[in-house]
Amino acid sequence: MTDTNALGQQQAAPLGVAVVGAGYWGPNLVRNFQSSPHFRLRWLCDLDVERARKVLGGYSTVQATADYAAVLADPEVDAVAVATPAGTHLDVALAAVRAGKHVLVEKPLAATYADGAVLVAEAEERGVTLMCDHTYCYTPAVGRIRELVHAGELGEVHFVDSVRINLGLVQKDIDVMWDLAPHDLSILDFILPEGVEPVAVAAHGADPIGAGQACVAYLTLQLSSGAIAHVHVNWLSPTKVRTTMVGGSKRTLIWDDLNPAQRVALFDRGVDLATPQELGVHERRSMQISYRTGDMIAPALPEKEALRSMVDEFAGAITEGRAPLTDGRAGLRVLDILEAASRSLEFKGAVVGLRTGH
Amino acid sequence: MTDTNALGQQQAAPLGVAVVGAGYWGPNLVRNFQSSPHFRLRWLCDLDVERARKVLGGYSTVQATADYAAVLADPEVDAVAVATPAGTHLDVALAAVRAGKHVLVEKPLAATYADGAVLVAEAEERGVTLMCDHTYCYTPAVGRIRELVHAGELGEVHFVDSVRINLGLVQKDIDVMWDLAPHDLSILDFILPEGVEPVAVAAHGADPIGAGQACVAYLTLQLSSGAIAHVHVNWLSPTKVRTTMVGGSKRTLIWDDLNPAQRVALFDRGVDLATPQELGVHERRSMQISYRTGDMIAPALPEKEALRSMVDEFAGAITEGRAPLTDGRAGLRVLDILEAASRSLEFKGAVVGLRTGH
Amino acid sequence: MTDTNALGQQQAAPLGVAVVGAGYWGPNLVRNFQSSPHFRLRWLCDLDVERARKVLGGYSTVQATADYAAVLADPEVDAVAVATPAGTHLDVALAAVRAGKHVLVEKPLAATYADGAVLVAEAEERGVTLMCDHTYCYTPAVGRIRELVHAGELGEVHFVDSVRINLGLVQKDIDVMWDLAPHDLSILDFILPEGVEPVAVAAHGADPIGAGQACVAYLTLQLSSGAIAHVHVNWLSPTKVRTTMVGGSKRTLIWDDLNPAQRVALFDRGVDLATPQELGVHERRSMQISYRTGDMIAPALPEKEALRSMVDEFAGAITEGRAPLTDGRAGLRVLDILEAASRSLEFKGAVVGLRTGH
Amino acid sequence: MTDTNALGQQQAAPLGVAVVGAGYWGPNLVRNFQSSPHFRLRWLCDLDVERARKVLGGYSTVQATADYAAVLADPEVDAVAVATPAGTHLDVALAAVRAGKHVLVEKPLAATYADGAVLVAEAEERGVTLMCDHTYCYTPAVGRIRELVHAGELGEVHFVDSVRINLGLVQKDIDVMWDLAPHDLSILDFILPEGVEPVAVAAHGADPIGAGQACVAYLTLQLSSGAIAHVHVNWLSPTKVRTTMVGGSKRTLIWDDLNPAQRVALFDRGVDLATPQELGVHERRSMQISYRTGDMIAPALPEKEALRSMVDEFAGAITEGRAPLTDGRAGLRVLDILEAASRSLEFKGAVVGLRTGH
């Protein structure tokens, strides 16, 4: 993966990459791999080779194929990006890992936690990079939120409230939770400070249109710090909302992904208790509450496309031999919550505990 | 309550009214009773008579008093409006009912369902009007929503999602649910079509600032039709949100109370299933889903103040001897949900069934 | 106007005040004088005494009258607030000034510059306070904007762009410019830094509905600094817009009066020229332009009602014997621009110079 | 341009096209010609061939060249799209026309009205299609506005108010008016009903940053119907605004290009005069004015990219041998207004008449 140039310096040659799956997400990967100097796109592979050809268009030098084995056999292919349906992630990604390729998998990492765990174990054993395409984590907004939280600018995280609703494509095989909540859960996983993690989840849902799947769902997560996180996903909303509020002891921020002029707003507003922690319950009842109603700051954010940053991170992780920001284990943690939430849905909202120590 | 004018026609003399409680809400009642031709405000009563005087201001002919007995003894007082803390509603309102006065009670009707039931029973026995001040039900927006739902313009109600969050006054004795959710629950009670009612509730909450009360809460209600309703109330949000979405099989509407230019928006957008109900599970998997993405209509709404309409309804109910739109039983139904939600909160989100047949 | 209390300390007794005019604006003055500790409202005077009674309502101890002479003869009346039609301002206000009363006049100060000048001269001669009710100057937002501009936080003012449009009450005797632009022009007068003033105006208008008056108008003002100010007023807009942008060499701010959550937004964004001023024209063509795209700050603002602050300022000016913030001369400067704009309108947009040295 | 397929039916072969200019706009044309089935992109031509290569990227089969003569000599090139700086439009486009190619020119059509007229005359003489890329006219929103206006849904057009402001790229050779107003003027030209056209313009501007060009400008247009149109363009605004209001005697619409959820809003609100037209001036003073405050409708709009529709229209005009919707004459009319506005700017806002009968 490195060349030696005229001056004898080593410089990175682009990584050969193949995209598998020419459906909804594949074309975005194709476009971003093509515009990245770190990659050379060699193949677009789909069972339906015509679909792959159509995605590439009439002016491309990239090869379309339906023959995945040929892709894996190509020594110029260093990495494979999997954008096939979730049910096939294990097979497709595992084959790539076993062929010694670095692998990027579209969210969710796999159809089940068990499948995902197999992938993670195999990739670790083989020493190849396994990355989960948690795209939103690579938006400038989420990056800044992570920085603000980790730097303590918000104080302790008190609550996280996320809404992701729109008139969605009702899916046949997965419900709204598995379709949309991976975004919110991966963001939550990404921004929470060290040591704070979800420990239990309860989910409520409904299928009012008779789709055979929940089309509206509410997830409530208990965090290890005692804080609460809540996710509202909905395929039936006539308007699109993409808002996350992160409430902290010092400041609270609101991320509105659909407001390009003001994606992140940081509020110096909140409720403070003047009561020292030592006071007893009765004294605390008569506590002094004070309110901050300070300024709001909307930080300037760069306009870089998230997928481009994600693709760069994939290259960086491969080249530097390190775990990517959203590695297989991040994908596993999201799967754990999704599975627990599904169980909760089955049991009418019962609280379900999460695995820990991923 | 009626006079005979010069032409021998009977015409309504204004109803004598007293307001009890000069705290947060009382001044609004004072202002609205004064501007209504249906009422003659006679007293403002508060244990702290100075506070009552201050509310009336230096130019008023209305009497301030701390002597509630004198108010009840005044034969010119036909009606009493109770705006004291919830814990005192039973005593104050019951005394008025027993004195033969018509009674308006600020939400919630009483501190407990049992207290509320006593009030309702006593008022029915005495034949006096008992009305609960569910103010939002009297906004032009909610009135229109009720009309639209009842006229079938939305089709079957599929889901209701309500958000009521802001930097709120953290209370010592009641949590955010008892403070804010009565608004959403009374609106829900008001707009749901005949035969559809909540049957169970689950509540999740958190007290991240250590206030001794939940400051963030999420309520999920199961409706008798299989639909879902959800309420998010929060005292810690730096921005104010007051939005309710009512999703229906034909149309979906969004009420944004903070957008005066477009309070109600009716969307002809949604997801339709082309599959006949007769098909089996397997056929439904391959169902034809279609999407409507039609126009949005924001109906013109009058600008009448809700409290003024509420006060007019109180007068109408008294004069016509009929139940007000938001009668004591409506107040009871809200109390039932609040109590069940509190139990659910205690039991970490367990689903709690509701009484029926109020 | 001062009393001596039990401890021998002098303390201000409230100023006796009368409001003249019970039409559109009068009730607001009545309400605010009543709630101010600095004033004692004695009279509401209107040619139509029934209208005055209606405004006071059925519970007031304030006297309604149609007899303006009696009001002026009342020695308890220290000040008179004039809220009659603009055409009568001169007569009503002059009579009050000549009776030795302090006078507050609703905008515009008078129907003509000449009338206004008479008023100002007479008030100065008599030594009474003459204040113009430029209400918007007393909003917390405009107060903050003035502070920011005067403190140099924006740098040099480059442009001011003001939009004040809505479905307005088409007037019979004044056009949209005289109805709405006084707000924008008085704000401009209030916020501009020392030494910067309008020197010429051009106005374009249209009367597309045949109302006999311009219903849409655009004013362009040339400022003495070379900057530009522009005002768009419109009675025919289906939506309400109230926005003013103040562009500066260092920062630019936007005031949106209809966005209570974010009335003032201060942007650290703009275009900078790196070229030193010494360079010749040709070099400047190849100048280095750089762009700042920094954070936005929305300062926290108090929620005080503007009219209340205005009434307090009136009291302060009277008590301290000083010119109020928006004195008669401020009213004159606005009249000067309005008259010049009317001439420009007549002459199809010709630029008309303004008087200077008011 | 037509083939005969296996069934003997003629079907259109794609038109060979070359894009000239690989700067700001060229890449958008490249992308859209490539994705259109009506075109086959053969060349991207730029004096800087490296820039052209970069735009095409490393996966393209399209040829990059700096040799414009070779492009024009290629018989497979049916059409040329010109995206070079405005000052070169005449030379580049004229050469293409003379080589018998159909020509698409980026706005403005040419640097001067005279240049544009030469182009139009030459194209008409040669019988080739000359189209001006007035992109906004091909947005679904503007298309719908044109339909609504032409169908009489707004009644008579009373006023048009357009705001196009943002932190813009300050140009060395053209001012903000020539940079941004072509959009608004071409839209105006596109949507105005038959028989209504601009007859005069006045322009006011400022260069507060010393850029050597107006950075803020206001254009007021008098329409032949007596209506008014106004355009505000500004390079110094920290926020982006793209709003056009079209006021009519029956309805008024607002187009907000930055609000994807509600781009066009049609308001049944306005001011009506009940006065018959026969009444004299004095009677009209006492006219009955009434206000409509009806519903607002936000029509559903397709999400088609404007440039794609523009490219399709170019193909349609060529194939059908008809004038495109935005032909050279539309480009000329816009140039006429821009030149007159520049003269007005020079003369401090003097009203300048327009040519008629283009």
Image (cartoon, coloured by chain):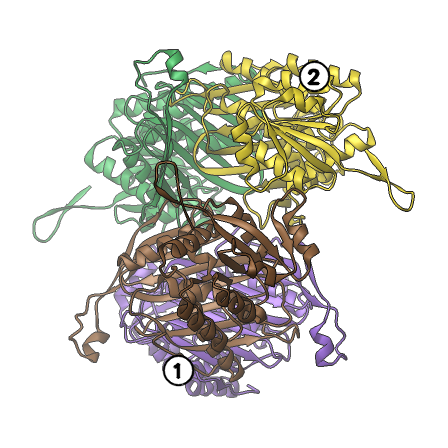
Chain colours: A brown, B purple, C green, D yellow
Residue C342 in the image: state x and y as whole percent: 51, 21
Q: Which residue is mark 2?
A: D119
- Chain letter belonging to callout 2: D
- Callout 2: SS: helix
On screen, residue A243 versus residue B157, left or right, reads: left
Q: Are marks 2 and 1 in contact (CB under 8 Å)?
A: no
- Chain letter belonging to callout 1: B
Residue B20 appears in the figure = no
Q: Is residue C158 above or below residue D353?
A: below
In the depicted view, which residue is nearer to us: C288 or B259? Answer: C288
Q: Is residue B118 above or below residue C256?
A: below
Query: Label 1: how many residues lie within 10 Å, few (<14), some (14-19) or many (20+)?
Result: some
Residue at horizontal 38 percent and vertical 75 percent from the top: B205
Amino acid bearing label 1 = Lys
Q: Which residue is mark 1?
A: B348
Residue at horizontal 21 percent and vertical 32 percent from the top: C321
Residue A262 in the image: state x and y as whole percent: 42, 47
On screen, residue B301 versus residue C276, left or right, reads: right
Cα distance, mark 2 to mark 1? 77 Å
In the depicted view, which residue is nearer to us: B200 or A345? Answer: A345
Residue C136 appears in the figure = yes
Amino acid bearing label 2 = Leu
Image quarter (top left, top right, bottom left or bottom right) of the C terminus of chain C: top left
Q: Which mark is residue C102?
A: none
Residue at horizontal 59 percent and vertical 71 percent from the top: A174
Image quarter (top left, top right, bottom left or bottom right) of the N terminus of chain C: top left
